[in-house]
Image (cartoon, rainbow, N blue to C red):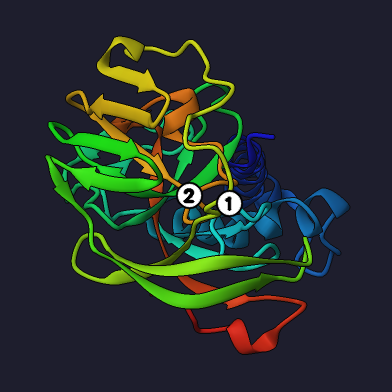
Amino acid sequence: MNFALILFILLVISAALWLADRFYFRKRRASDAREPVWVEYGASFFPVILIVFLLRSFLVEPFKIPSGSMLPTLLVGDFIAVNKFAYGIRLPVINKKIIEIGAPQRGDVVVFRYPPDPSLDYIKRVVGVPGDRVAWQNKRLAINGVPLELRRDGDYFDAERLFYTPRYEEKLGAEPHMLLIEEDAPAYVPHVMQYPLREKCNYNAAGVICEVPAGHYFVMGDNRDNSQDSRVWGFVPDENLVGRAFYIWFNFRDLKRIGGFR
């Protein structure tokens, strides 16, 4: 469902009703006459819809975590806030960038339109930026030939799967983050799709090595063995970016998570 498009259509309809009432019908109503239903429930919602549209299009958009691919950083059911202007100002609905502000950095958690089906929004962590050589070999990540430092940090209990998974701290970008790696899971990447620029990647029994092309990003889930990401369906084009996730604003199951993340 393209919520931005639906909101835009509601905005246009309510704006048309408001303008029609403001500059035509209101002048022809008696001063003591009651407002018609279409004004009360149509035109009167225009300011509210306008504010919501502007906030959601240019400042912050809410997003709900639908799967466990970002465990342990984000849990299923987390409601997060997404910074819409972190990577540039884009026109709503058509998503065309009109003002360049910044670009994703390694370690950023981003929401983007899923390349095989742009009607879906996905969330992953940026691992490789344009020009990077990303190597995922034997369950270890290296960027431009430099292996990332991993520190074991106990085990993580997945309450959904009733399963303990080794937890690690990884330094990617400015801040370290936690991730999960199942040592018993196969190292190779299963179910690889035929995606654009697939020739930039070399798959082998140990995993995959990719050269990130210009205007694209390589993303992975923190739950490394339970994430469908760039290893499977390819690179994220810049035009697919929605924004940078930074804040948990609600979770029905665990109110203590409110205010977490970064």
In the image, what residue occupies the spot 33% across and 38% down?
Answer: 137
- Pointer 2 with pointer 1, Cβ within 8 A: yes
For the point 59% across and 73% down, the residue is 156
Q: Nearer the viewer, residue 156 or 61?
A: 156
Q: Which one is in front, 14 or 71?
A: 71
Residue 78 vertical placement versus 244 (above, below): below
Which quadrant does the C terminus fall into?
bottom left
Image position of 111 with respect to 203: above or below: below
Earlier in the chain: of badge 2 and badge 1, it is 1
| Residue 218 in the image: above or below residue 209 | below
Dot 1: what SS? loop
Residue 167 locus on image (x, y percent): 49, 69
Instruction: Give the quarter of the image for residue 77.
Output: bottom right
- State left or right for residue 181 relative to residue 162: left
- Image location of residue 74, percent across then percent down: 55, 66
Residue 60 badge: none
**Residue shown at 35% from the left, 13% from the top:** 198
Q: Which residue is mark 2?
A: 221
Q: Is residue 232 above or below residue 162?
A: above
Q: Nearer the viewer, residue 27 or 151?
A: 151
Give the residue at mark 1: 69
Left or right, 45 with reference to 172: right
Total labels: the figure holds 2
Q: Say what amino acid the circle numbered 1 marks.
A: Ser
Q: Residues within 10 Å of mark 1 (few under 14, many from 20)?
A: many
Q: Is residue 74 visible?
A: no
Q: CA distance from mark 2 to mark 1?
A: 5 Å
Label 2: which secondary element: loop
Name the residue at 58% across, 51% down.
69
- Can residue 92 be seen from the camera position used here? yes
